[in-house]
Image: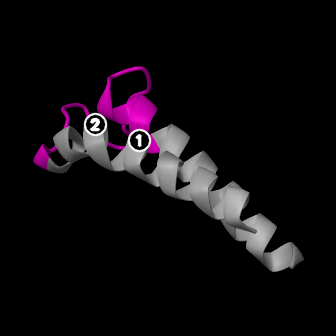
Amino acid sequence: MIAAYIDEIIMFCAGLWMTSVGFGYLPLPGYSASPPLVRHFKWMGPMLLVIAIVLAAAS
């Protein structure tokens, strides 16, 4: 039970980080220019947030 909450919290935090890096609010550590993968963070981050919220509501 507690492990599920920890998993959802980690997933939510990762989604927040991916969203903020994808939209340029935070820089990607270790890179002076954004690699091509960062442009996918714009949709992967919000999707991860939605999945975390749905899993939290279901449990």
As drawn, 51 above or below 34: below
Sort mark 1 into few (<14), some (14-19) or many (20+) by Cα contacts within 10 Å. Answer: many
Q: Position of residue 21 (x, y in %)?
A: 38, 33
Residue 29 visible from this viewpoint: no
Give me the C-alpha separation between circle 1 and circle 2: 7 Å
The residue at which mark 2 appears reads as: 42
* Image point (63%, 64%), residue name: 55
Q: Position of residue 58 (x, y in %)?
A: 69, 65
Which image quadrant for residue 29? Answer: top left
Secondary structure state at the residue bearing disc 1: helix
Q: Amino acid at mark 2?
A: Lys
* Image point (49%, 48%), residue name: 50
Disc marking residue 7? none
The residue at which mark 1 appears reads as: 46
Work out which quarter of the rendered image holds the C terminus and state it.
bottom right
Q: Main secondary structure of the magenta part?
A: loop
Q: Position of residue 44 (x, y in %)?
A: 32, 49
Secondary structure state at the residue bearing disc 2: helix
Which image quadrant for residue 41? Answer: top left
Work out which quarter of the rendered image holds the N terminus and state it.
bottom right
Circles 1 and 2, Cβ within 8 Å, touching? The answer is: yes
Q: Is residue 30 magenta?
A: yes
Span colored in magenta: 18-36
Is 10 on the left or on the right of 39, as rendered?
right
* Callout count: 2
Q: Position of residue 54 (x, y in %)?
A: 59, 56
Q: Amino acid at mark 1?
A: Pro
Is 49 on the left or on the right of 31, as rendered?
right
* Image point (51%, 47%), residue name: 49
Camera-nearest residue between 32 and 3 = 3
